[in-house]
Amino acid sequence: MTAVTAETQEANEAYEAAFDAAVAADERIEPRDWMPEAYRATLVRQIAQHAHSEIIGMQPEANWITRAPSLRRKAILMAKVQDEAGHGLYLYSAAETLGTGRDELLDKLHTGRQKYSSIFNYPTLTWADVGAIGWLVDGAAITNQVPLCRCSYGPYARAMVRICKEESFHQRQGYESLLALSRGTPEQHAMAQDAVNRWWWPSLMMFGPPDDESAHSAQSMAWKIKRHSNDELRQRFVDICVPQAETLGLTLPDPDLRWNEERGHYDFGPIDWTEFWEVLKGNGPCNEQRITQRRRAHEEGAWVREAAAAYAAKHGEATA
Amino acid sequence: MTSTVNAAALALGDDALVLSHRLGEWAGHAPVLEEEVALANIALDLLGQARVLLSMVGDEDELAYLREERAFRNVQLVEQPNGDFAHTIARQLYFSTYQRLLYGRLAATGDGDFAGLAAKAVKEVAYHQDHAEQWTLRLGDGTAESHERMRRACAALWRFTGELFQPVEGLDVDWRELEADWLASVTAVLERATITVPDGPRTGAWSAGAGRQGLHTESFGRMLAEMQHLHRSHPGATW
């Protein structure tokens, strides 16, 4: 071994020790700090997947903007879909602080090399689905995301603080919309129950596979990117939802759901993990449709982005 | 509220409602993420204006969801389909320039029926106009393709711009002066964007003012069918 590489190795070990100490002390890692390459790669993968989920997640809800049944609901829904685009923007920016730009990440999404949350591969068939997504899907997202506000990587943690505030508004509007339906006409009540029946199990799948089958969990917990296990968060979500469903006057489609005095939690029935893996592999009801629409919007917008770049070059502006 | 004020509120409210709906159709389809945010923002501002204006006349949802096509009083410009991004921007340029000049005048009346609304809306609309101008410049003076698309869009929508200046009863505005200001403003932007100002007629074969009289274009019926379907399927329901 030459002196130089020995010195480099020594320096790397010192950096690594400083990184480990910072994580152990619950300090934030910032963009200019040294970090292990695997930590960087894990964050880019996770933040990108989260950003992609925000922009693909606009589709099932935007599906109802033009048919929203009152102007108040229409305004709320448009604001929510707009928030999701905004979340996409913060998250792509957070990924950029790790050295990976938005264009590269979008290209990976469009070519299937990066994923988005599988929940958005389910269709929104009735107006009540908009409420069910707010209550259950955004509710599950908040349960997952609140701990990320304490994630060890600073820019991601700070983006999550703002995102969680807005998600909490999304969850409340969904709940309130379902309540109006549940207490409305018999047809509206039936619409709400049908939506909850279809979205309940996919929402539980949002927490990812059981802990013993989760590929990235252990290392992410050690790095304090992740703070709680998939099963822990899933249980927390079920415990929150059961009393809310009662207030809504709607049932959850699980005959095994009951309070377990000993555990201090609700027991729930087995999740169909075959469905989860099938949807993840691309065989969900809307995988093809979602990615095709995303790709088409991007391709059809190419001439607009080129025009903006050409104009900026001519007029000496910095390009976006 | 007098009937002329009602008629004016309906005209302005329908313009905002219909354009907001068209912009809402962009959600999930915009050419770049920043435009998802911007177009939704403009749509939300317009929907907010529409709700205030329609509520001056009656129940906002009854007016939006239960009127037939012939009862809508919006100008035909705002109901025109989105087309490509250049068409949407040309529509925005023409309409937001008109709206800013009109609301500026209504706000200046101080105590008119629309002064309060106009004073708030004119700030929003100034942003809409700036957004449209900035994109008109970029598309017009960008690439050969974007220039051609922007030129075509400006020309295609030109014949819907005459209607904007048909006097609306109940609005105390000098319409000739408004039109002259509009033409000067739009001409200046198009020239900077290297787009020749269209030379075709500013009205269609029908008399100008068709939309204000409840005569619309074919695509409007489809737009309303989509917008009103769910509400009409559940008579009397609350949401």
Image (spheres, rainbow, N blue to C red):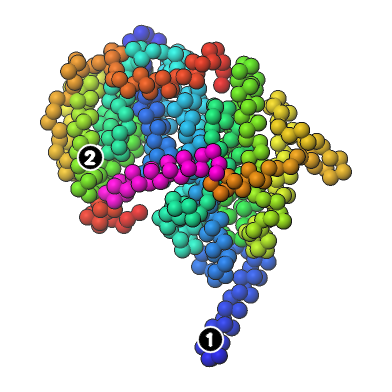
Counting from the top left corner in percent of width and height, residue A51 is at: 50, 50
Q: Is residue B50 above or below residue A17?
A: above
What amino acid does circle 2 point to? Met
Q: Chain of mark 1?
A: A
**Foreground residue among A243 and A258:** A258
| Quarter occupied by the C terminus of chain A | bottom left
- Residue A162 numbered tag: none
User: Relative to A107, is A198 above or below?
Assistant: above
Between B145 and A311, the residue placed more toward the observer is: B145
- Residue at the spot 64% in from the left edge and 58% down from the top edge: A215
Q: Nearer the viewer, residue A175 or A117?
A: A117
| Residue type, label 1 | Thr
Residue located 44% across and 27% down the image: A66
| In the image, residue B163 above or below residue A101 | above
Q: Main secondary structure of the magenta part?
A: helix
Query: Residue A59: in sight, yes or no?
Result: yes
Mark 2 residue element = helix
In the image, residue A32 sits, relative to residue B35, either above or below, namely: below
Tell me where residue A253 appears, x and y as whole percent.
Answer: 71, 32
Q: Is residue A301 magenta?
A: yes
Residue B11, image x, y percentages = 33, 18
Q: Which residue is mark 1?
A: A5
- Report the residue that reaches farthest toward the top: B3
- Looking at the image, the residue that sits furthest to the right is A262
| Residue depicted at 39% across the width and 20% down the height | B224
Q: Is residue A289 left or right of residue A128?
A: left
Q: Position of residue A112 (x, y in %)?
A: 48, 52
Q: Is residue B39 left or right of residue B130?
A: right
| First to last magenta residue range | A283-308
Element under label 1? Answer: helix
Disc on res. B150: 2
